[in-house]
Image (spheres, rainbow, N blue to C red):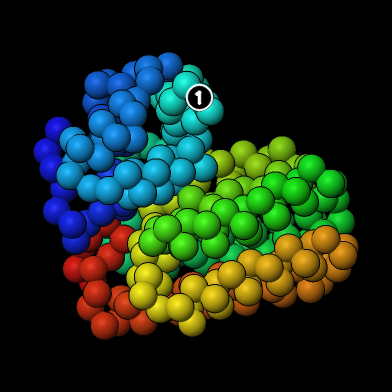
Amino acid sequence: MEKISRSRLSDVVVERIKGMIQSGEYPPGKRLPSEKELAEAFGVSRMCIREALSVLAAARIIEVRHGEGSFVRKVDVSTYIPPVAASLLNFPEAALHLLEVRILLEAGAAELAAQRADDSSLQQMEEALDGYWHEVSMHGSGAGSDLKLHRAIARATQNDVLVELMDRIADLVAEGMTYTLGKNQGDPERVRQVADEHAAIVAAIRRGDAIAARTAMVEHLENVRRKLARLVAEGVAGPNGTQA
C-alpha cells in the first residue's frame, strides 16, 4: 500500500480502502487490517483511519464488529453505487446537484420522522449528535457521525423505500460530507453551527413538530449547499480533489 501525503488524509483513506475492496483485494466477508496496521501502511494517524472506517461503516461498505475488527459487508452487488456514479463527485457541479436531491428527500424524511420516530430511532439520533462532537474533539471532520444522523432520520420514517433510496446514495453522501465538513476543521464557529443545526432537527423530531423538522433540515442542507457553492466559485478543489 502506498503511503498518503498529510494534505489528503481521511477522505483519501476512504477512497483507497474502497479501491482495495472493489479490486477484490478485500472481498465481502474479509477482515480489514487493524487500525494500527492501516495507519502504518498509509502513513497517517490512527484517528484518521478511525474516521475513514466510520464513514465506510455509515455507508454500509464495511461492518465494524466490536472486539473483532472491521469486515467488508456481504451484500448483493446491486446495492453498491456503480463506480460511474461515484465518479460524479469529481465534478463540483454534480456535488451541488446531489445536495439538491438530498434537500428534496431529507426534508420529507425529517417531516415523516417527526410523526413516526420511536424511542430506538431517537436514541440513535442522540448517539450520532454525541458522536459528532467526539469526532471533532479528536480532530476529525465528524463526517461519520453526520451520516449516521441522517441515516437514523431516514430509518425513523419507517418507510422502506425512502430508507433504500438513502442507502443507495449513502456512498456519494459520505464523500460529500467528508469534503465539506473537512473544510470546517479549524473553524470552531462553523463546527458549532453544524452541531446546532443537527440538534435543532433532532429536537423538532423529538417533540413531533413535523413542520419545524422539515424547516430545520432544509435550513441545514441549504447552508451546506451555499458553502459548497462558495468553494466552487472560489476555485477550491472539489470533493475528490478536482479543481473547480
Q: Dividing the picture into quarters, in which one does residue 129 lie?
A: bottom right
The residue closer to the viewer here, 88 or 14, is 14
Read off the residue under disc 1: 67
Q: Residue at x 37, y 70 (%)?
A: 185
Q: In percent of the image, x 59 and y 70: which residue is there?
A: 195
Q: Nearer the viewer, residue 16 or 98?
A: 16
Tell me the SS state at disc 1.
loop
Closest to the observer, 43 or 242: 43
Q: Is residue 193 above or below residue 125?
A: below
Q: Quadrant of the N terminus?
A: top left
As rendered, which of 79 and 131 lies closer to the eye? Answer: 131
**Could you tell me residue 97's position as x and y percent?**
44, 64
State the image quarter where residue 158 is shown: top right
Q: What residue is at 68 percent from the left and 64 percent from the top?
A: 107
Picture quadrant of residue 115? bottom right
Q: Is residue 118 rendered to the left or right of residue 108? A: right
* Tag count: 1
Residue 42 percent across, percent down from the top left: 19, 41
Quadrant housing the C terminus:
bottom left
Residue 217 seen anywhere in this rendered image of the structure = no
Residue 221 visible: yes
Counting other residues with Cα less than 10 Å from the Cα at mark 1, is it few (<14), some (14-19), or many (20 or more)? few
Instruction: Give the residue displayed 27% in from the left and 48% down from the top.
Output: 45
Picture coordinates of residue 43, whole percent (x, y): 17, 44
- 241 relative to 28, above or below: below
Q: Amino acid at mark 1?
A: Gly
